Image: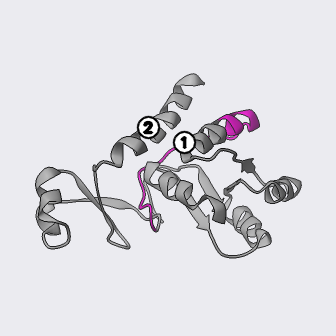
Amino acid sequence: MPHSKKSTRFVVDAMLGSLARKLRIIGFDTEYYREGDDVGLMRLAKKDRRIILTSDVSLHTRALSAGLHSLFLTGKTDRSRVSVLLRSAKESGIPIVRGDSLCSICGSQLISIVPEALEGRLPSQVLLRHRVFLSCADCNKVYWKGSHWKRLRALERSFARRRTER
């Protein structure tokens, strides 16, 4: 999964899939561990030097006991979980560094693509309304600044504010 900036690496448990997708698009190398047990997740975190993000207190406690970095996330929304993530990381001395946006589905690099190359793949109204398009280098999912963009930007600004608070 090549990308230009070394971002903080996360592994997210099965209960936080929505957050995993958003973290990728915001610029974090995030593995979504949706199948398998806690031992497997902890093994992956250790092998790939990833920070565990979980809302499972048992997993969090076991991970800390095993000497792994783990952040226990509370909150009902991804926005509140990001707030907890940032606060907990700061308290734990864990640096949070964003990289380039990644595919929300597979975590691969996004590349610019001209609208003409997307004819037949997207509705013509989308192609007419938007100018900037990105495509996943691996799974070919296409992204553009649609209505969801404002919500993602709000999450992204949470990370930017943290940088200025240091």
Horizontally, is 9 left or right of 129 in the view?
right
**Upstream in sequence: badge 1 or badge 2:** 1
**Residue at 57%, 61% in the rendered image:** 17
Viewer-proximal residue, 53 or 28? 53
Q: What range is drawn magenta here?
A: 87-105
Amino acid at pointer 1: Arg
**Residue at 12%, 63% in the rendered image:** 124
Q: Position of residue 19 (x, y in %)?
A: 55, 54
Q: Is residue 137 above or below residue 98?
A: below
Question: Which labelled disc corresponds to residue 10?
Answer: none
Q: Position of residue 29 (x, y in %)?
A: 53, 57
Of all residues shown, which one is farthest toward the bottom? 36
Horizontally, is 4 left or right of 80 in the view?
left
Quadrant in the rendering for residue 92: top right
How far is mark 1 from mark 2, CA to CA? 8 Å
Residue under label 1: 79
Residue under label 2: 154
Residue 97 is covered by the magenta coloring = yes
Q: Position of residue 93 (x, y in %)?
A: 72, 36
